[in-house]
């Protein structure tokens, strides 16, 4: 820590559990466990974090009690993952446990406490978890002027997903603000031990088998490789300059996406995914490119309120050659719907299937090189009041620095910042150097904007 942050002490909070023992990992936990293990020693890249402002009338003892209540409620926040003798991870809970909460003091003027909290979050997020022995949650309180100003949360992605940490944040903010008391908190969602038992049941075993049949179909039809390699030897995967991420903020694409979605009666997610499918087909020369998707997998009511991880992966394969954009949008929507219906499945069996089909086809592996995820909230249809007052602001590109090694050549994701969609491409720069990556993003933008202006998609 630099001299703007001083650790002044720590508090140990007792927490209890309804479970004491071990259970298999859920399919979602195992999916993220495998990804996290592969990324080591850079696995801290997956850590999820949030910084919460503490209201002025919330004192430290009250804040610590809220933390104790929440961590007691949600078993995913204190689950260890020890290994069996054969190296298989398992969930482990203790009936009595303890949460350690360090306290830091911020030096400097009051207006700088938010920056100090962000620095503290970055430092804590940058540390890997030893999930075999320690809980997957780190908390820290930042004080200034004799009272708590910010609460920092860092949670391993093996324990929580994007929706789960959103639920956790909402619950804590509700307690901190006084909108809810601990006694008024709603019942917790399904617990990870319960989810593991559910997945071992006959219904989910049949669902997993159907999903694996779908995966086998896609793996047999997909091209074995997506991108033709450049000349020469590639740099090592751990070369610090090999992977990078660029972000494109495009007001023009934001509006065009909504226009095309409204016109064709689909979601904005489908529009962007279709454009990406079409652009990848042209860029790679493949008739169809497999696209990995992330499914939140929170259909059952018990999973919608689960502070944990429920995600699953699925894949689509959409032919794009010789088709109009409207046809690609339609086919992409149908393919995505079919793929989402085929999740989740047993992660260990899926890994075995991928190896089996690769051997059957006589290749080392089936290259699932491209992935897509949309983190934008759903938007209502455009109305007359949404008409722009003038031309959209220009498109901006920002290279966000280098990233640790990735299993994919391209991970394309979208979020929203201040009402504008931001499209991100995390890429293997050996296959997709900067100029080629920016042109890929520009091509997505151009395709959707042109479709919006054509009137017929």
Image (cartoon, rainbow, N blue to C red):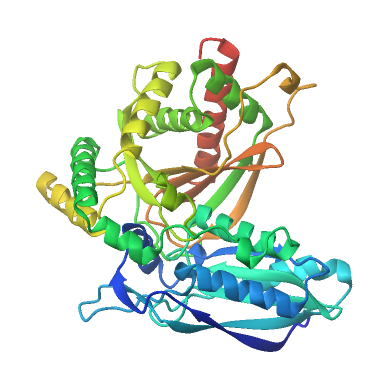
At a point 68% along the width and 31% down the height, the residue shown is 251
At a point 25% along the width and 73% down the height, the residue shown is 88
Instruction: Describe residue 355's horizontal placement relative to residue 181 as left or right.
Output: left
Instruction: Describe residue 170's horizontal placement relative to residue 79 as left or right.
Output: right
Residue 142 screen position, x and y as percent:
74, 76
Q: Name the image quarter holding residue 159.
A: bottom left
Task: Please state which of residues 11 and 370 is positioned toward the viewer in this rendering.
Answer: 11
Residue 161 screen position, x and y as percent:
48, 57
Task: Please state which of residues 23 and 245 is positioned toward the viewer in this rendering.
Answer: 23
Visible in this render: residue 54?
yes
Instruction: Describe residue 120's horizontal placement relative to residue 92 as left or right.
Output: right
Q: Residue furthest bottom?
A: 9
Q: Residue furthest right?
A: 109
Q: Name the image quarter holding residue 106.
A: bottom right
At a point 36% along the width and 75% down the height, the residue shown is 81
Residue 66 screen position, x and y as percent:
65, 72
């Amino acid at each position: 820590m630099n001299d703007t942050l001083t650790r002044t002490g720590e508090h140990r909070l007792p927490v209890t559990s309804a479970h004491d023992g071990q259970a298999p990992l859920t399919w979602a936990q195992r999916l993220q466990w495998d990804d996290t293990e592969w990324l080591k020693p850079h696995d801290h890249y997956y850590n999820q974090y949030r910084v919460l402002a503490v209201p002025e009338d919330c004192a430290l003892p009250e804040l610590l009690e809220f933390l104790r209540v929440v961590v007691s409620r949600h078993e995913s926040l204190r689950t260890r993952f020890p290994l069996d003798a054969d190296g298989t991870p398992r969930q482990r809970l203790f009936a009595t446990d303890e949460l350690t909460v360090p306290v830091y003091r911020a030096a400097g003027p009051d207006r700088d406490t938010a920056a100090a909290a962000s620095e503290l979050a970055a430092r804590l997020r940058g540390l890997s978890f030893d999930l075999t022995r320690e809980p997957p949650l780190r908390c820290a309180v930042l004080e200034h002027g004799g009272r708590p100003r910010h609460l920092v949360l860092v949670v391993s992605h093996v324990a929580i997903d994007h929706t789960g940490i959103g639920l956790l944040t909402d619950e804590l903010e509700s307690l901190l603000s006084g909108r809810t008391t601990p006694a008024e908190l709603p019942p917790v969602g399904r617990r990870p031990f319960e989810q593991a038992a559910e997945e071992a049941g006959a219904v989910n075993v049949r669902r997993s088998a159907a999903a694996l049949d779908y995966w086998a179909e896609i793996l047999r039809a997909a091209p074995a490789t997506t991108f033709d390699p450049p000349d020469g030897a590639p740099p090592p995967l751990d070369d610090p300059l090999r992977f990078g991420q660029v972000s494109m903020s495009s007001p023009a694409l934001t509006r065009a996406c909504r226009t095309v979605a409204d016109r064709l009666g689909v979601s904005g997610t489908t529009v962007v995914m279709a454009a990406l499918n079409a652009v990848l087909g042209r860029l790679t020369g493949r008739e169809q490119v497999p696209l990995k998707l992330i499914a939140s997998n929170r259909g059952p009511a018990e999973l919608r309120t689960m502070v944990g991880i429920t995600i699953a992966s699925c894949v689509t394969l959409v032919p794009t050659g010789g088709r109009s954009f409207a046809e690609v949008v339609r086919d992409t929507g149908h393919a995505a719907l079919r793929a989402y219906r085929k999740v989740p499945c047993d992660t260990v069996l899926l890994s075995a299937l991928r190896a089996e089909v690769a051997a059957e086809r006589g290749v080392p592996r089936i290259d699932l090189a491209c992935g897509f995820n949309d983190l934008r909230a759903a938007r209502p249809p455009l109305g007359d009041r949404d008409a722009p007052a003038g031309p959209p602001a220009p498109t901006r590109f920002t290279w966000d620095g280098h990233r640790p090694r990735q299993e994919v050549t391209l991970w394309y994701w979208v979020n929203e910042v201040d009402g504008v969609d931001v499209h991100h491409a995390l890429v293997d720069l050996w296959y997709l150097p900067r100029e080629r990556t920016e042109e890929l993003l520009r091509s997505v933008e151009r395709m959707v904007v042109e479709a919006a202006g054509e009137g017929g998609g």
